[in-house]
Amino acid sequence: MNKADKLTQVIGIVDEKCINCYACVTACPVKFCMDGSGEKLKINHDLCIGCGHCTVVCRHNARIPIDDTEKFFSDLKQGEKMIAVVAPAIASVFPDEYLKFNGYLKSIGVKAVFDVSFGAELTVISYLNYVKEKNPKLVIAQPCPAIVSFLEIYHPELLPHLAPADSPMLHTIKMIKEYYPDYKNFKVAVISPCIAKKREFDETGLGDYNITMLLLKEYLKKNKINLSSFPVTEYIGAPAERAVTFSAPGGLLDTAERFLPGIRRKTRKIEGTHAIYPYLEGISKHINKPEIEFPLIIDCLNCELGCNGGPGTGNNHKELDELESPIRKRSAMLEKKINPRQQESEFRRYHKILKRFWKAGLYNRDYINRSGNYKIKIPNDAELKNVYEKMLKHSEADLFHCTSCGYGDCYLMAIAIFNNLNKPDNCLHYTLSLLEKEKKTTVFINRQLSSHINRALEVIEQIHNLVEHLHTVINIQTDAVKDSSIVTEEMVGSLKTTSELSREKRESIKQLIEHATNGQEAMKETVSAVQTISESVEGIGSAIKIISVIASNTNLLSMNAAIEAAHAGEAGKGFAVVADEIRRLSESTGSNSRNIAQTLSGIISNITTTSRRSSETGALINVMASEINNFAQVMTGLIDTLSELSSQSFGITKSLGTLKENSDNVKTDYDKMLQLTDKLRYDINFLSAMSADIVKAIENNDQALIQKLTNNA
């Protein structure tokens, strides 16, 4: 595509507002400028003719007009020198205030305001002059830039039949540039009812701002500007007459009748996207057939309500008579100024005025063949069949030719899909086929779901029973934990008391060890003393034996002395007495020595026994001391262990507290779990019943039941 073939974007897209309703495709007269292959509809602006009909039918404001309103006001504030040309539709948009609108423009710095109606008068002269000089087979009027774009892109074969003259707006601008030199270098702001006019200005290099009346009204409302507060200000230059109705359907003919009475019989008036574009396509098919007679002039408009209800006016919601009433009122006011008796002379006078501003060749217009923009491929039969298969269209009965896709013809939809401008998902039949399959699938799935739900319900019931049992066990466990906590706390208390007592007895154990050690030493000394006594007693025994021998010898001596005394007679009586005493002493000594010997023998025996027992007792005391020492060591370890256990008892108590708290939490959670399983069991039962109802509703296509189920859901 050449850069020159690029077309100005005049329609904006607000993706977040687009809901893919396809109203814009339905309204679009050329269809293939719309790209529905993605998530949101897009526009190929080089195929869009700018008719603006999509902005009218879009109720979501996802399609919006693009113009130069903001730039106009911005540049004006920056001191840009400007004049304005105003389309005749202004009288319909601002009834009774259109001349006050001129006052507003002057108040904000616009130097001069011209009426496009006068340019329309010049346009009719250009048309009639062309017909007179060239005697064409057919002249297609071109005040509408959307029609110009349509022919340039889609039917360039009709461009030779498109009137080679400028639109009324361009006539007006060229007239100003030619005959008002004071404004030659001024920027031109066009107050327009048409979105597509921007393209006309860009293509010809005339007209600097396309300011749609729609966005102009929004600007005035936003800034709280009341036109009634401004003075009435007339247009600059020669006034228009009949052409003030040019914005209404048939306005061109009304004006042309003045110059060429009866021209209506050779003219076809046609307007509206649903009528004009199919009509032009029909002409394209038959233009070279000599047997078909065509009208001399086709007075055509893109908008069914004319320029007064164009997409750039915001008036599309009004009735035709409501729109045209202010226009007729303005026309009637102009007619009142003409004296009926002087109509002929007034016409000649006005015609002279028009000729002053009309120059041969000044208002000529050339067109650009933009058919290179149109690269739509037409599928052959095999390719078309393949596309239809993708759309699940297997027979003629599947060709609905509905308007859900926006094309109104399955063949056109197939072409769009073939060119990647759409997708089967946007076809109603495709969607219904999928829905039917999904319906069957849904019924099957719901049956399976119902079966699984019933099995799940059984499992849920088992789980519920287990949870109930577990809930009981948890309650018992919780109580046991509480009891264990109490017992353990008491045990830990006793342990702490025992630990404290053990620490107190540690010193007693130490003293016991010391006493045992002392006793062992004392016992050793006792055994040693007993042994010493035993030895001493044995010495006494030996002495007593000696005494006993002495006593025996004394006794023997006394016996000998007695004998000797007896032998001595009287002289020996005294000695006999002594001898007798010695004998008694000897006997007493012997007797005493025997008694002492016996006594000592008993003592020695007892001392021996005592010594033996003392030795045995010493050994036992040694063993006892060793055992006491071992016991002391064990008791010391036990006391240490008890001390450590006592120091850790706080942690045990704290852990038991935490365990008790967790046990309480578990009990609470299981209470909730039990409630939830009850609810889940209820929901599963409800879901099971609902699934059965859904299957029944889908099988019977019971929309009322489906709606009821949906509402209940």
Image (cartoon, rainbow, N blue to C red):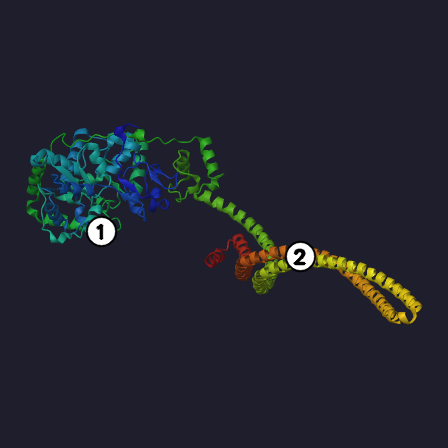
Q: Which mark is residue 467?
A: none
Residue receiving disc 2 = 521
The picture quadrant where one finds residue 605 is: bottom right
- Which quarter of the figure has residue 711? bottom left
Point out the tag, 1 or 2, that comes first from the N-terminus: 1
Q: Percent position (x, y) of residue 100?
A: 12, 50
Mark 2 nearby-residue class (10 Å; few <14, some 14–19, many ≥20): some
Q: Give 357 or 85, whichever is nearer the viewer.
A: 85
Badge 1 amino acid: Asp
Q: Residue furthest top?
A: 2
Can residue 253 be seen from the camera position used here? no
Residue sitting nearer the eye, 667 or 132: 667
Would you say residue 434 is visible in this rendering?
A: yes
Q: Left or right: where does residue 636 sit relative to residue 179?
A: right
Check disc 1 and report the residue beneath it.
Answer: 321
Identify whether 577 is placed above or below 399. Answer: below
Reply above or below: 598 against 120. below
Mark 1 and mark 2: span between their CA atoms? Answer: 143 Å
Q: Position of residue 666 (x, y in %)?
A: 54, 59
Q: Amino acid at mark 2?
A: Glu
- Quarter that holds the N terminus: top left
| Mark whose residue sits in front, 1 or 2 | 2
The residue depicted at 20 percent of the width and 30 percent of the height is 135
Would residue 348 appear left or right of 456 to someone viewing this image?
left
- Residue 239 sits in quarter: top left
* Residue 614 appears left or right of 319: right
- Label 1 sits on a secondary structure element that is helix
Residue at the right extreme of this rendering: 567
Q: Is residue 129 left or right of residue 521?
A: left
Question: x%, y% of residue 27?
Answer: 33, 43
Q: Which element is circle 2 on?
A: helix
